[in-house]
Every structure is written in C-alpha cells, then in structure tokens.
C-alpha cells in the first residue's frame, strides 16, 4: 500500500522560510516522478516542482530561484525548501508520485498518481 504523508507546513511572515517533507512508503517504481503541488483557496491545484529518478528538477516560473525540491532516497523522503515566501504562496501543499517516463508537473497532475493529504502553508504580509 502506497502512502505519502506531508508535514512542515505552518504560518510565516512574508520573506520567511519553510521546509516541507513528504515521507513515502510502499512505493518503488523504476521511472519515478515525484512532485509538489499547491492549491490556493478557491483555485485549482497547480504544479510547483518535480524531480525524477536521476535527480533532475523542474520548477514553475513563480517559484524558480526561491524553492528547491530534493529527495533523500535513504529516508524515502521528498522535500521542498521554500525561501523568500510571499503571500501568494499561501495554499495547501501536496506531494505526488507516479511512474512516468517523462517527468513534468502537468503530466504528473493528469496521471493516476499517488497523493498525500496535504499540509497548509500560510504567508502573511
């Protein structure tokens, strides 16, 4: 049984930092694509960043240079380091994983991926 459990969300002021974690269990695919997504209040879920089995990463423009996605395979954990947070980063953040030959967030979003339950990030001005 595959499980993804996020943690690390919270409330911070603009310019602050948070590190999200996603512990993955029961998942071991050859071409794994893992990513972080967010869903602001009243809006659709959107991609943030993805990382593939080889460690290659991709970010959406709005977080490029501020957020860093990484993974620790020994701990089966996916991370999202978020710096220089802005009020518009406020959202529920989710991690996802699937076996994809091409790892892009829009493909992961449309796939039959495994998802976590989410962790709330709130950034105040």
Image (spheres, helix red, strand yellow):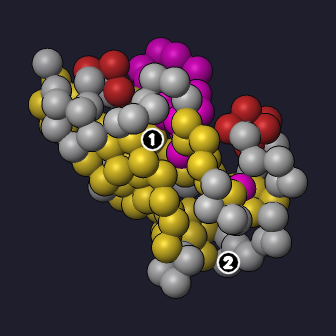
Residue drawn 51% across the image and 66% down it: 71
In depth, the one of 109 and 83 nearer the eye is 83
Quarter occupied by the N terminus:
bottom right
Q: Could you tell me which secondary element the residue under label 2 belongs to? A: loop
Count of marks overlaid on the render: 2
Question: Do we see residue 66 in this rendering?
Answer: yes
Disc number at residue 93?
Answer: 1
Asked if the stretch drawn in magenta spans residue 45, the answer is yes
Q: Could you tell me which secondary element the residue under label 1 belongs to? A: strand
Measured from the top left, where is residue 106 in percent x and y? 73, 32
Q: Is residue 32 left or right of residue 72?
A: right
As drawn, the residue found furthest toward the top would be 42
Quarter occupied by the C terminus:
top left
Q: Is residue 43 left or right of residue 102?
A: left
The relative height of residue 117 versus residue 54 in the rendered view (above or below) is above
Asked if the stretch drawn in magenta spans residue 66, the answer is no
Q: Residues within 10 Å of mark 2 (few under 14, many from 20)?
A: few
Please provide the residue range marked out in magenta. 33-48
In depth, the one of 31 and 10 nearer the eye is 31
As drawn, the residue found furthest toward the right would be 101
Q: Residues within 10 Å of mark 1 (few under 14, many from 20)?
A: many
Disc number at residue 26?
Answer: 2
Residue drawn 78% across the image and 38% down it: 107
């Amino acid at each position: 049984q595959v499980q993804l459990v996020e943690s690390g969300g919270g409330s911070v002021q603009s310019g602050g930092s948070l590190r999200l974690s996603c512990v993955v269990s029961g998942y071991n695919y050859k071409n794994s694509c893992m990513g972080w997504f967010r869903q602001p209040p009243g809006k659709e879920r959107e991609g943030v960043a993805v990382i593939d089995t080889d460690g290659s990463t991709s970010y959406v423009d709005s977080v490029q240079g501020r957020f860093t996605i990484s993974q620790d395979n020994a701990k089966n954990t996916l991370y999202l380091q978020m710096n220089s947070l802005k009020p518009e980063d406020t959202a529920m953040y989710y991690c996802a994983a699937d076996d994809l030959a091409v790892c892009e967030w829009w493909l992961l979003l449309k796939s039959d991926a495994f998802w976590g339950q989410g962790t709330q990030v709130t950034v105040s001005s």
